[in-house]
Image (tube, rainbow, N blue to C red):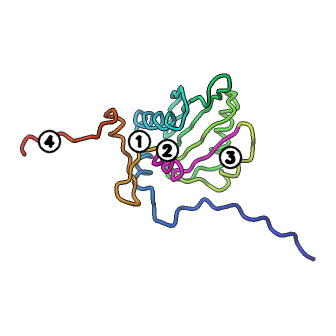
Amino acid sequence: MSHPPSPTPLPQHAPSARPLPWEPALTQLRSLAADELDVLVTQWLTAIGLTDVRVRQHQARSATYQAILGRPPFATPLHIRIVQRQNQLQVHHVDAFRGYLQRLGIAGGLLITTGGCAREAFLIAGATPAPQVCLLSGEQWTAMLAAERVGVKSARLPRWILDLHRFLCGGRPYHPPASEGQ
């Protein structure tokens, strides 16, 4: 008796072959204070074309933002949740965010972690059309920040660090004050 062929396995979201290619940026993202995270997220969301970015709420190690995608009359509100954690995001995190979106009547959202994501979390995020949840791992988000040149720069390949001074100093490079004894 022959069995039907097994479905092709979905790609694993395993870490890159290089050891920690986005470190120390990921560690720095995990430890950002709420106000620094707000600046970074607002800059990034604006850079990718979202408008009217606002902070909705801060909770322990997570922040939720609201933004508008598109222009009236076809504008769509989105909510973006950043979860600052090292451990993998699990299915219950996706379910909780989807429930939050449903309660508010929001059609879609972006769930971002500074850690990894369990394979099942990616599957659940893409399984239900409403509300739509897009899930980004820490490495994916850091790559997007680097691509938009928002808050992340290469210190020496392949290491990446946060570059908040540029944004906190109004776009000017940060130069530490010279000590008087020199």
Which label's residue is closer to the chain start, 1 or 4? 1
Q: Which mark is residue 181?
A: none
Q: Amino acid at mark 2?
A: Gln
Disc 2 secondary structure class: loop
Mark 4 nearby-residue class (10 Å; few <14, some 14–19, many ≥20): few
Q: Which mark is residue 125?
A: 3
Which label's residue is closer to the chain start, 3 or 4? 3
Nearer to me, 88 or 6? 6
The residue labelled by disc 4 is: 178
Quote the CA–CA distance across marks 4 and 2. Answer: 34 Å
Disc 1 secondary structure class: loop
The residue labelled by disc 1 is: 32
Disc 3 secondary structure class: helix
| Residue at (51, 67) in percent of width and height | 17
**Image x and y of residue 116, in percent:** 55, 54
In which quarter of the view is residue 74 placed? Answer: top right
Q: Nearer the viewer, mark 4 or mark 2?
A: 4
Q: Amino acid at mark 4?
A: Ala
**Image x and y of residue 119, in percent:** 65, 56
Q: Amino acid at mark 1?
A: Leu
Are dots 1 and 3 in contact, CB under 8 Å? no
Q: Amino acid at mark 3?
A: Ala
Side of 152 relative to 106 (left or right)? left
Which label's residue is closer to the chain start, 4 or 2? 2
Are dots 2 and 1 in contact, CB under 8 Å? yes
* Residue segment shown in magenta: 132-147
Mark 1 nearby-residue class (10 Å; few <14, some 14–19, many ≥20): some
The residue labelled by disc 2 is: 84
